[in-house]
Image (cartoon, rainbow, N blue to C red):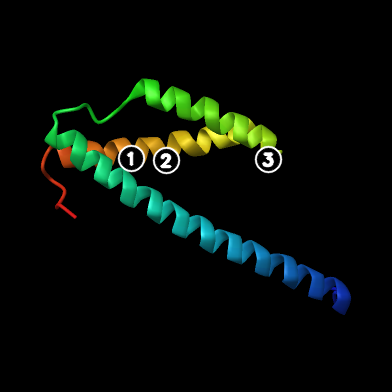
């Protein structure tokens, strides 16, 4: 294996540091999002509302695809990510509605 030029390695380390910081921010943002969706789940359960809201989900997908386009991110990737998150949220809401999740 060849040795990497020190200036290239320094730039690689700098970029990877930025990636690590962004990853940490994403995790914290997701944690905050899930705190809010847990509250939504409890509100829905108390008011006998269904765990899923297909109209809201469709609006969110359209909104996120538009944001992704503006940010030069693949809208299909953004939609897949949101679908993954929403599926997890719905699973949480179902658990809350079934009374198997502890109140927070």
Q: Bin the neighbour count of mark 1 within 10 Å (Cα to Cα): few under 14, some 14-19, many 20 and up.
A: many
Residue at the spot 39% in from the left edge and 48% down from the top edge: 33
Give the Cα separation between the discs numbered 3 and 2. Answer: 20 Å
Residue at the spot 24% in from the left edge and 40% down from the top edge: 41
Task: Mark 3 vs mark 2: give the one in front.
Answer: 3
The label shown at residue 71 is 3
**Left or right of 51 on screen, residue 77:** right
Residue at the spot 43% in from the left edge and 52% down from the top edge: 30
Work out whether 42 lies above or below 69: below
Q: Which residue is disc 2 drawn over?
A: 85
Report which quarter residue 69 is drawn in. top right
Which quadrant: the C terminus? bottom left
**Residue 95 seen from this side:** no
Label 1–label 2 contact, CB within 8 A: yes
* Element under disc 2: helix
The label shown at residue 89 is 1
């Amino acid at each position: 294996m060849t040795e990497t030029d020190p200036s290239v390695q320094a730039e690689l380390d700098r970029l990877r540091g930025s990636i690590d910081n962004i990853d940490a921010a994403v995790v914290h943002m997701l944690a905050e999002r899930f705190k809010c969706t847990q509250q939504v789940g409890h509100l829905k359960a108390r008011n006998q509302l269904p765990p899923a809201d297909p109209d809201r989900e469709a609006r969110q997908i359209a909104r996120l695809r538009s944001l992704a386009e503006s940010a030069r991110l693949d809208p299909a990737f953004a939609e897949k990510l949101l679908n993954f998150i929403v599926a997890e949220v719905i699973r949480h809401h179902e658990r809350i509605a079934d009374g198997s999740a502890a109140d927070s």
